[in-house]
Image (cartoon, helix red, strand yellow):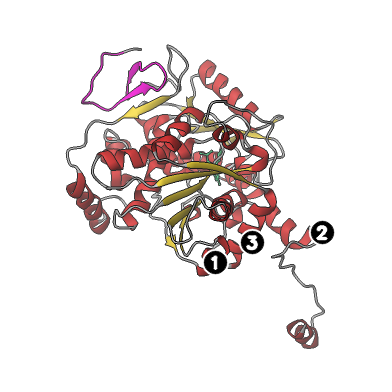
């Protein structure tokens, strides 16, 4: 369904061929060319300082329902109306932890902990908007392919909204905590014999044939919600942009969302400087980083392999829009090894913060970029921790208990007899 251009109403636009769709169209991609859709927002009624004041006011008077997403509704989903499905979510902390800063080699490092969201990952920010949209357009069922966090989040929000949820996850490759959540929240969980990329292809077919509303991060409303990670960071810093926003990157929905957020924040006069975005991939799943090394002249796909199962993705769906995000923000893309990820995670965990393996890629990436002289040691850097420490207990226990030789930060448990002497021996030893 192609409609005439309505520049003053929020609408969807194909990023490839510029075909316009109303913001109620359920098509997951451009019907004309198969390109990804993006939301073009109606110009908000306020700008700059007045818009900043409105956001602050909502937080103060509670009219945001306690949500760090819906507080920004004019620049997230202005036509959500009474359909909002909010847990609430967002309002996550920005943490300074000297031990982690020292390890990364950058004094002004802050950790934006998205694991504090209701289902333990940043996905809740996109999902509250995606499920709100599903309800707004009268969808009966929703679906996604996932490495585990999107499915956990979809399951929870669909349950709240009373929608049937179908999730496609790669069999045997999803962290325990995430799979458990999807079952607990009542999603129909399909363990697909294939990798994430196969799951994504399958769910797209299923959504087209069966008319199920697709809620992967190719869904432009999900991207709108995920913008609020960056918006909230900027607000927490008094709208004084950091030099860098560093985040782990897999399917690249979040990188795309960060790019859109900082561009819009700049255009609306919320900030006066655009922070540089650094996207970090796991070395065994780094098609975007490889492509960056060619200045994006070549697009790669890989057979993904990494301990960080959340970002084990070989053919990222939001590739093009993530390229825009990196180019616009004068950003960079890098990759880190599984060992670097695990060491970063152990340092973050031992600082009493904790995160899942993929999240630690951001801190490992910051460290690498400092060593390479890309990030300056006195730069202001915000690294996003995307998921909670309990998401992947399997990886955690392997690191501390099973790996041989023991990794540098291993903290294995000690089995003892039930005697005070045994406790003493441990303390002395
Ligand atoms: N960190 C975590 C913990 C994730 O779960 C994901 C993606 C990412 C980072 C990367 O974000 O894909 O937008 O580049 N997880 C998706 C999922 C793929 O299905 O839960 P991205």
Whether 149 is drawn above or below 318: the answer is: below
- What is the distance, in whole Å, between disc 2 and disc 1 at their CAs? 27 Å
Which quadrant of the figure has residue 345?
A: bottom right
List the single residue furthest toward the front: 373
Q: Are marks 2 and 1 in contact (CB under 8 Å)?
A: no
- Return the residue nearer the eye: 245 or 121: 245
Residue 260 visible in the shown view? yes
Residue 368 at x, y percent in the picture = 58, 52
- Return the residue nearer the eye: 32 or 372: 372
Write down the residue under mark 3.
346
Residue 45 at x, y percent in the picture = 17, 38
The residue sitting at 72% across, 58% down in the picture is 399
Going from the N terminus, do you reach mark 3 or mark 1 first? 1
The residue sitting at 48% across, 19% down in the picture is 211
Going from the N terminus, do you reach mark 3 or mark 2 first? 3
Whether 18 is drawn above or below 129: the answer is: above
Going from the N terminus, do you reach mark 2 or mark 1 first? 1
Quadrant of the snapshot with the C terminus: bottom right
Residue 285 at x, y percent in the picture = 64, 38
Which quadrant of the figure has residue 18?
A: top left
| Residue at disc 1, secondary structure | helix
Write down the residue under mark 1.
102
The magenta segment is 3-22
Residue 264 at x, y percent in the picture = 30, 38
Residue 191 belongs to magenta span: no
Write down the residue under mark 2.
404
């Amino acid at each position: 369904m192609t409609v005439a251009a309505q520049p003053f109403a929020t609408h969807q636009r194909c990023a490839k061929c510029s075909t316009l769709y109303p913001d109620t169209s359920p098509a997951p991609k451009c019907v004309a060319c198969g390109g990804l859709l993006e939301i073009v927002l109606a110009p908000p009624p306020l700008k700059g300082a007045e818009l900043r004041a409105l956001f602050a006011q909502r937080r103060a008077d509670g009219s945001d329902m306690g949500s760090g997403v819906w507080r920004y509704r004019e620049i997230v989903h202005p036509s959500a109306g009474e359909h909002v499905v909010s847990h609430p979510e967002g309002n996550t902390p920005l943490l300074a932890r000297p031990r982690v800063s020292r390890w990364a080699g950058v004094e002004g490092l802050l950790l934006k902990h998205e694991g504090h969201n209701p289902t333990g990952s940043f996905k809740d920010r996109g999902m509250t908007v995606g499920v709100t949209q599903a309800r707004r357009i009268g969808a009966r069922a929703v679906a996604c392919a996932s490495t585990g966090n999107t499915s956990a989040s979809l399951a929870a929000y669909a349950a709240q909204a009373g929608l049937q949820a179908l999730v496609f996850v790669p069999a045997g490759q999803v962290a325990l905590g995430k799979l458990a959540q999807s079952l607990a929240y009542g999603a129909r969980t399909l363990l697909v014999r294939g990798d994430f990329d196969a799951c994504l292809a399958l769910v797209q077919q299923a959504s087209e044939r069966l008319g199920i509303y697709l809620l992967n991060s190719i869904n432009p409303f999900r991207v709108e919600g995920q913008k609020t990670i960056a918006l909230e960071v900027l607000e927490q810093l008094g709208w004084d942009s950091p030099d860098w926003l560093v985040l782990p990157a897999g399917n690249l929905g979040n990188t795309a969302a960060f790019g859109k957020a900082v561009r819009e924040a700049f255009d609306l006069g919320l900030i006066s400087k655009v922070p540089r975005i650094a996207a970090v991939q796991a070395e065994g799943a780094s098609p975007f980083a490889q492509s960056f090394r060619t200045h994006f002249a070549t697009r790669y796909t890989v057979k993904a392999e990494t301990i960080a199962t959340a970002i084990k993705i070989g053919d990222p769906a939001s590739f093009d829009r993530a390229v825009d995000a990196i180019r616009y923000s004068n950003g960079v893309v890098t990759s880190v090894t599984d060992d670097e990820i695990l060491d970063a995670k152990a340092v973050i965990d031992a600082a009493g913060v904790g995160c899942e393996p993929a999240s630690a890629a951001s801190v490992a990436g910051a460290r690498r970029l400092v060593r390479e002289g890309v990030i300056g040691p006195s730069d202001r850097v915000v690294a996003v921790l995307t998921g909670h420490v309990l998401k992947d207990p399997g990886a955690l226990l392997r690191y501390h208990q099973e790996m041989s030789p023991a990794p540098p930060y291993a903290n294995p448990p000690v089995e003892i007899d039930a005697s005070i002497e045994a406790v003493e021996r441990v303390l002395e030893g």
